[in-house]
Amino acid sequence: MSRPEGIIRRLAASRRPSSTHLCQKCLLSLPPNRLASTATAVQPDPIEPPPSGRSAAPSPTPTSPRTTYRVQASVMLSRPPLLTRDLTAFEKAYFLYQRRLNERLALPFSRYFYYQKGTPGDVDWKRKIRERRTPARDIGRYDAYSREEGWNDEVLVGARESEPEEQVEALLKDAEVELKEEEGEGEDGGDRSTQVVKEAVAKPLPRVTDADRAGDRRSLDRLLQRTLYLVVRRQDGRWWFPSDALVGKESLHTAAERILVQAGGLNMNTWIVGNIPLGHYVRNYQKPQVEKDTNNNNNNNSSNNNTAREIKGTKYFFMKGRIMAGQANLKDNKKGLTDFQWLAKDEVQKILLPQDWSAVKNILAER
């Protein structure tokens, strides 16, 4: 065989299709003409149609219900404290001790700098100083400059000088002014008789109101030193905060305002604080509820528009609100509410379900 014939045979063999499969490394090492012939050789054969000539129908895929939650906005409408909190027994005793200590360390009271000698004011001052023995009016009977009692400035066990009610009574008694009224001549033509009358002093309102004494939990004039929250009773008898589902694309802030109007009426001047909720609570149902999903419009096919959805529970988003004036009125409410109460944190715990209380106990204010 001549040399040119050997070259021709090798070229023909290189163009002959091969039935073997090559790895990626070998494919990259082949020349372009060899690579094209190899790709042609490994191309799969076409699938022949069925003998009947009809294409096989796709197998139906079962659709499972879509799992979701109901989303509701819940309003924690509160009335802030109107008074300072009650003092503890230690605080009462400590504050009285500080006032007595200040009375003992202060300079003596200069009577004639404030009252001119012989005037009615000076006479009234001498009468009062004999009773309380100290210029201060709310520290009880105490002589700061006495050698026998000046050191005894602490409150004894059972003493009422440290009680705020006792101090208010002492201030009111000191504010009384004695007026002398002269009557007409006597029956025997003698001198006129003189009668001492004390001028009335306006008393401050008590910290305990009539609503506290009557136990009226619907009134806002109770527990003035605590924060009160509005809770309502639903048709199923469960106590909860005013809540409702979101309508359309409304925000939580807008939904909270709508809920207060629909639940408590228009006789409340309220303010929804901010757009961000205080917290959220997921309440799962014991058994999921299955209903038609009318909002599923992803497909235009009418058979897919009313697919079922499985509701596992409700997600509550709590919005903070303040009441400025007015009162709740459930007469024309649209939520089926039967009763309402204004309660402090410890009172809310007693009427809520245990799982509901564990979700809101860290949101409510202590006082």
Image: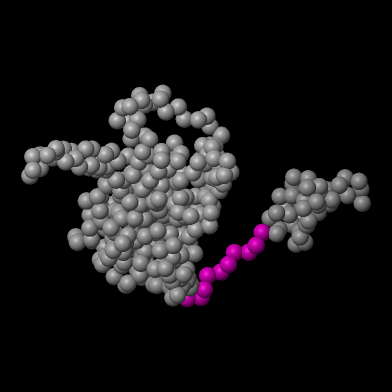
Q: What residue is at 34 percent from the left and 55 percent from the top? A: 208
Q: Which residues are magenta?
A: 43-55
Where is residue 364? Give x, y as percent: 45, 55
Q: What residue is at 40 percent from the left and 72 percent from the top? A: 289
Q: Is residue 72 visible?
A: no
**Camera-nearest residue between 149 and 166:** 149
Task: Decide: is 147 above or below 247.
Answer: above
Q: What residue is at 7 percent from the left and 44 percent from the top? A: 187
Q: Quadrant of residue 4?
A: top right
Inspect the magenta stretch and tell me whether residue 42 lies in it.
no
Q: Is residue 42 left or right of residue 286?
A: right
Where is residue 218? Give x, y as percent: 28, 60
**Camera-nearest residue between 336 and 327:** 327
Where is residue 116? Give x, y as percent: 35, 24
Task: Decide: is 39 above or below 171.
Answer: below
**Camera-nearest residue between 106 and 230:** 106
Q: What residue is at 84 percent from the left and 50 percent from the top? A: 10
Q: Is residue 147 left or right of residue 43?
A: left
Q: Quadrant of residue 112?
A: top left
Q: Main secondary structure of the magenta part?
A: loop
Inspect the magenta stretch and tell me whether residue 45 lies in it.
yes
